[in-house]
Amino acid sequence: MICVMRHAMRRRTFFLLSLTALCLASAATLPAQNDTVIENDQVRVLKVPVEAHQKTKLHEHKVNRVMIYLQPGKQDINYQDGKKAVLQFKAGEALWSPASGMHIAEITSDNPVTIMEIELKKPAASTKMANSALDPLKVDPKHYKVDLRTIRFAWSGSRSGRTRLRRCTSIR
């Protein structure tokens, strides 16, 4: 009876070790997974390792992104409508990537590249500056007024090392 139990345990152990080895071997051949670094309602930051000469599946990006390439390289992008784009980037270079249609991308340089993708989830606010409550002209107009007719500025840079004073008038 003890021999039968030992034999069954050995078979079970061998099966589990084989299964583990198979999982590890298949994981080594799978493409690298994206790591989400930050995600909230406004932005998602992904760390994306990309192998050289490995094409992506057909996909699209529905939001604008900033791409920061951690290694130098070259990337071909083939759009479904037939358009092609070639990106050449330096290590640490940040590039704007607007939302785009269906495409397949491939790193065509010889080394793998890691890309930090910053996806902007919300549209940008208007380009007008909001009036700040800290603006002294708005907070206390009785004590602060703008009446700029003359401005003075000083700099040192002459050979004698003296500070020079320059006056400009009628700045509006």
Image (cartoon, helix red, strand yellow):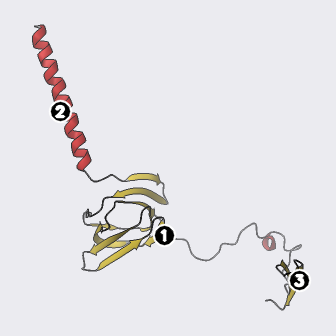
The quadrant where residue 172 appears: bottom right
Q: Is residue 127 above or below residue 13?
A: below
Residue 62 higher or lower than 127, as above or below:
above
**Dot 1 or dot 3, earlier in sequence:** 1
Q: Which residue carries the number 3 mark? A: 165
Residue behind mark 1: 123
Q: Quadrant of the N terminus?
A: top left
Residue 128 drawn at (x, y percent): 62, 77
User: If you read the primary sequence from the N terminus, does the residue marked by circle 3 or circle 2 appear first?
Assistant: 2
Horizontal and vertical percent position of residue 56: 27, 63
Which element type, helix, strand or loop, lies under badge 1? Answer: loop
85 in relation to 114, above or below = below
Circle 1: residue type: Pro
Q: Nearer the viewer, mark 1 or mark 2?
A: 2
Q: Which mark is residue 18?
A: 2
Pointer 3 local density, CA inside 10 Å: few below 14, some 14–19, many at least 20: few
Q: Residue at x 27, y 74 (%)?
A: 78
Q: Amino acid at mark 2?
A: Ser
